[in-house]
Image (cartoon, helix red, strand yellow):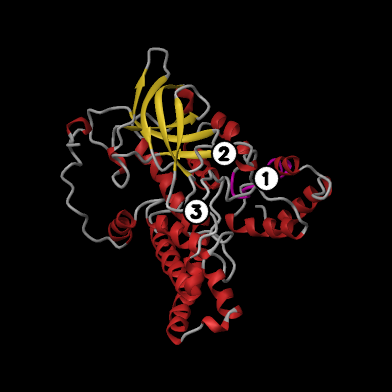
Amino acid sequence: MTDAADLRRRTAELLAAYPPATTDRLDFLRARFDAGLAWVHYPEGLGGLGAPRSLQAVVDADLEAEGAPDNDPRRIGIGLGMAAPTILAYGTEEQKRQYLRPLWTGEEVWCQLFSEPGAGSDLAALGTRAVRQGDGDWVVNGQKVWTSSAHIARWAILIARTDPDVPKHRGITYFICDMTDPGIEVRPLRQVTGEAEFNEVFITDVRIPDARRLGEIGDGWKVAQTTLNNERVAIGGMRLPREGGMIGPVARTWRERPELRTHDLHQRLLKLWVEAEAARLTAERLRQQLVAGQPGPEGAGMKLAFARLNQEISGLEVELRGEEGLLYDDWTMRRPELVDFVGRDAGYRYLRSKGNSIEGGTTEVLLNIVAERVLGLPGEPRTDKDVAWKDLAR
């Protein structure tokens, strides 16, 4: 069993062989992956050593202390947090070896082709069709929406309907889609922030080899649950230092600008600071629980807390700054490669946080998940669960 001492030894050997100060960034990341120090809990040969997941922090701390480059996790978050664990759980050995290394090093960016104009909250109602051809390939037609990073992505995780004659949850299959293939069109969706980090994706007669299918035909909903559960943990359970995230800029402004303080704002800031710290510690506990296996529905609770806190904290920040809070730094139309909540001004944080209760699962859907799958409360009546998808009203 690999322990902390062994990991420190391996990390020291990596640093000696590839000194960060003189080694090309990508060469260092590739060497780290090959040494099993990318995801220490992944299998050997796939970026890991089969070690306990909790020991990743040992490696990360030693590498950070020596100034080693990271893989820009915010830019490749969809690949790291959603595609990788799904490929690990359902991919063939060939798929794992093809996709995981360039995914982790950031050479290939991933996006998520799940939501559709008529299937957002009710994702299982999706209508994008994949039809099997005589040569075994699949031809896919449809439209996806709210697709982060589609404009820079090399690959996508895609769910499509392969059998319209069965109930909606049972006729879905999961694929890996090449975003450079003919028939893929990515259009920007400009948001209230002025940016277009989201996109709509049109898929017209795109051929996907059966070798890029993840899981069995018709099991796409089950495979997608692995993606979605990991997505919620990735969004709501990210590792932060104390006063990390949205609470940090507000706390700094409070300390540096005493003329802005009022008793009411003080009480609200104290309440939100405590809630943010409680959420941070709860996320740490959730990550420790992941050592035992894949995340479950509990991640929905963390994602709910993340969205509510971001919106309340950013609202407080705008009020605290008064007239300054109404200013906005730049409305220029951009297509950014990542979302930077703390690198912009208070106005940006306020507007961008509105999307937190939609992306990664709407608040309403996540409340149902917590109620039914965590608390065990009676489920909502569902009259369509035994009706063939083709017969559903649309």
Residue 33 belongs to magenta span = yes
As shown in the figure, which amino acid type bears the numbered disc 1? Gly
Name the mark on residue 348: none
Q: Residues within 10 Å of mark 2 (few under 14, many from 20)?
A: many
Question: Of residues 362 and 267, which is closer to you in this image?
Answer: 267
The residue labelled by disc 2 is 109
State which region is magenta.
31-42
Residue pictured at 45% horizontal, 87% vertical: 263
Q: Are marks 1 and 3 in contact (CB under 8 Å)?
A: no
Residue 278 makes an appearance in the image: no
Element on which disc 2 rests: loop
Residue pictured at 47% horizontal, 50% vertical: 194
Which of marks 2 and 1 precedes in the sequence?
1
Q: Are marks 3 and 2 in contact (CB under 8 Å)?
A: no
Q: Separation of disc 1 and disc 2 at Cα?
A: 21 Å
Q: Position of residue 90 (x, y in %)?
A: 47, 37
The residue labelled by disc 3 is 234
